[in-house]
Amino acid sequence: MEMYDYLGKLLLLLEKFGFTFTQKKRTPAKTQHRWKKSLSEIEFFVDDFTSQATIIWQKRNEFLIKKGAHLRPSYSLNKDGSVGLDARMGTQLRVEQKRNIQDFTTTEDIILKSVNEVGLFLYLVERTVG
């Protein structure tokens, strides 16, 4: 109890000299990305890695890439000359949608399940080792 009395007096003294103490708010450990109905009304524009697209987050696990999106035409190899997992997955997504792609441009709206799939589809993202 003596320690709490001492701290109480010390805080009172510090406050008299103009020091104020407030409790710090806790922030969540991880940012949470949650779908809300209002998000389905917003168009997201992508213009990177020689790709351009308009994307709408329609439902919790449904992303619409609007017709006319320009896809990145190629990907880089890993340092050892192999094709990376991301490039293989992006290629697989494009094969599944090949009827909707002509000259690296989408001819119909395309629906994918996640932000990661959208990125892989548009960019054929690769990660190099090292």
Image (tube, rainbow, N blue to C red):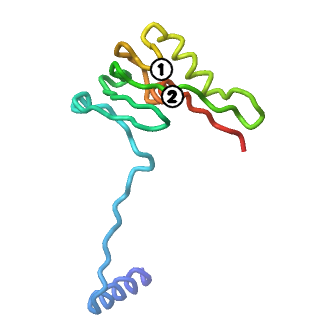
* Residue ranking furthest to the right: 80
Please tell me which of labels 2 and 1 falls first in the chain.
2
> Could you tell me which residue is drawn at 57 percent across and 19 percent down?
91
- Secondary structure at badge 1 equals loop
The quadrant holding residue 62 is top left
Image x and y of residue 68, in percent: 35, 21
Please say if 17 is above or below 67.
below
Q: Is residue 37 left or right of residue 87?
A: left
Q: Mark 2 touching mark 1, by CB under 8 A?
A: yes
Task: Tell me the crowding category of disc 1: few under 14, some 14 to 19, or many 20 or more residues within 10 angstroms, Cα based.
Answer: some
Provide the residue designation for mark 2: 72
Residue at figure coordinates x 22%, y 29% from the top left:
41
- Callout 2 amino acid: Arg
Q: Label 2, label 1: how many angstroms apart (C-alpha)?
A: 7 Å
Report the number of numbered marks: 2
Tell me which corner region of the image, top left, top right, bottom left or bottom right, holds residue 21: bottom left
Q: Tell me the residue at 69%/31% (across/down).
A: 77
Q: Residue furthest toward the top?
A: 99
User: Badge 2: few (under 14), some or many (20 or more) residues near its Cα, within 10 Å?
Assistant: some
